[in-house]
Amino acid sequence: MLNNNYLTKLINLEGVKFKDIYIQEDTVRVLIAGINHTQLCPYCSQPTFKLVDIKPKVYRDADLAGRACYLEIDLRRFECQECCCTFNESLDFASPYRHYTKRYEQQVYKCCQETTATYTGLKFGMSDKTAAEIYYKEAKSKQRDLQSLLSTQVIGIDEIAIHKGHKDFAVVITDLTNKRVIDILKDRKKAALKAYMAACNEEFKNEIKFVAIDLWAPYRAVVEEMLPKAKAVADRFHVMQNLNQALDCCRKRAKKESIDQEIWKDTKYILLKNREKLTEQQEDLLDKILELKPDLKVYYKLKESFRSLFNDLNDRQTGREKLSAWVLNTVRHKATGYYEFVKTLLNWEENILNYFDKKVSSGFVEGVNNKIKLIKRKAYNFVNFENFRIKIIDSFP
C-alpha cells in the first residue's frame, strides 16, 4: 500500500497535502487540501485567516501512470479583515479561474508547438479554441523582455511576407549571434522601426555593433540615427540578388533576340546559381549559351567575379580596391545592363565594405520564412497579427 508521503512526492505539488486517491480503469482522482491557513489579500496585500466559504473544484492534471489525472480540492474562500474583500485561496499549481494545472497547460503548449490547435484539442479533450488560448498564454508569458535574455552585438533587420502576393510585409528583427527572432513589426515604415528602437533599453542598443540590412535606405537611416555605435552592413545576399536581377534582364534580352528558343529553357537557374554547384550537364548548357551570346558571357563573368569578392576577401581596404576595379571593368566592357547596379554600389559602398569588418548576413531570415510557410501549412489558429507574431517568436526560443 502506498503511503501518504510517497503519494505527496508523486503528485509533486507545493502548498497542498495529499488526502486520498481513487484509481479507476482510465482515470485517477487525487484528493488534496491546502495547507496555508493564512492568505495574502490580492487587493491590499494584508494577511488574513478569516474563512467564509468552501467549494469543491476539480483541476485536470498531467496524466498519472497512463491515466487521466484529476485533482479534487475543497477550495477555500477568504475575507480580508483589512479591506473586507473576498477571494479564493492562491494555489501554486494552477492559475486563477483555470480548470487545468500549470503542468497540464505546459503539455498542451508543447503539443501546440509541434502540431496544431485542432490536433491538440482532440488529444487533450478540449476545444481547439481552448488549446489555442492556452498556447498563446504560455508563449506570451515566456516572451519576457527578449532584449535582456541574451547579449548580442549583431542583429538583422529584414522583411518577411505575411501573405504571398498581398504585398503585406512585416519587419523581422533578428539576433544573428544567437539565432533567434527578437521581434516582428507589422509596419515596415521608417517611423515604426524608429519608434521601436526608441523604446529599446539603452544597454541593449549600446551593445549592438553591426546591423545586417537589405538595400532599403530607411533601414540604414534608422540604424545611423538610433544605433550610433553600430555599423549598417549591406547584406551580401541582397546585394547579389540585386546583381542577379540585372543579369536575368540581360538573359531575357538575349533570349528574345535568339532564333533557337528551346535552348533557353531552364537557363535562368544555371546563370544565377554558383558555378561550382552546377552539374556537368548544366555546365555544358551554360557554356553553350555563353558562346552563343558573347555579351551575356561578359555579364556572367562580371557576376562571378563580383561574387568572389565576398568569398575571397577578408579586409576592408582590399575590398575597396577590388570593388573599384570591378566597377571600372564593368564600364570598360560597356556593360550597360549593370549600370543601375553600379549606381547602387556607389550609393551603398561603405555599407558593403562594412561586410569585410564583420562578415554578417541576414540569411537566418530564410529560416524564419520557412517557419512561416510551415505554420501556414498547419493552418494554425492565428487570426490576427499579434498571434502571428507570438507564434513566430516562440518558434525560435
Image (tube, rainbow, N blue to C red):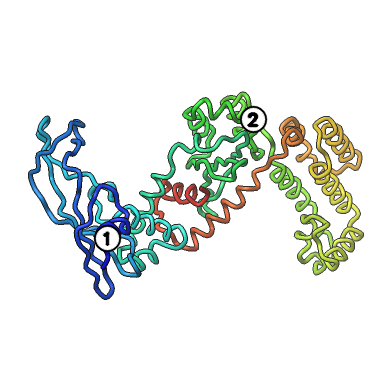
In this rendering, position of residue 181 left or right of residue 18: right
Three-letter amino acid code at the position of disc 2:
Lys
Residue 157 in the image, given as x and y percentages of width and height: 59, 39
Q: If you read the primary sequence from the N terminus, does the residue marked by circle 1 or circle 2 appear first?
A: 1
In this rendering, position of residue 108 left or right of residue 310: left
Q: Which residue is mark 2?
A: 209
Q: Which residue is mark 1?
A: 60
Residue in the image at 54% along x and 33% along y: 190
Residue in the image at 49% along x and 28% along y: 201
Judging from the image, what secondary structure is the residue with disc 2 in? loop
Q: Is residue 286 above or below residue 55?
A: below
User: What's the CA distance linking mark 1 and mark 2?
Assistant: 49 Å
Q: Nearer the viewer, residue 321 or 51?
A: 51
Residue 375 in the image, given as x and y percentages of width and height: 49, 58
Q: Is residue 80 above or below residue 181?
A: above
Residue 24 in the image, given as x and y percentages of width and height: 24, 73
Q: Residue furthest bottom?
A: 25
Three-letter amino acid code at the position of disc 1:
Arg
Total tally of numbered discs in the picture? 2
Q: Nearer the viewer, residue 292 or 365?
A: 365
In this rendering, position of residue 324 left or right of residue 97: right
Query: The N terminus lies in which quarter of the figure?
Result: bottom left
Judging from the image, what secondary structure is the residue with disc 1 in? strand
Q: Residues within 10 Å of mark 1 (few under 14, many from 20)?
A: many
Q: Is residue 155 above or below residue 165?
A: above
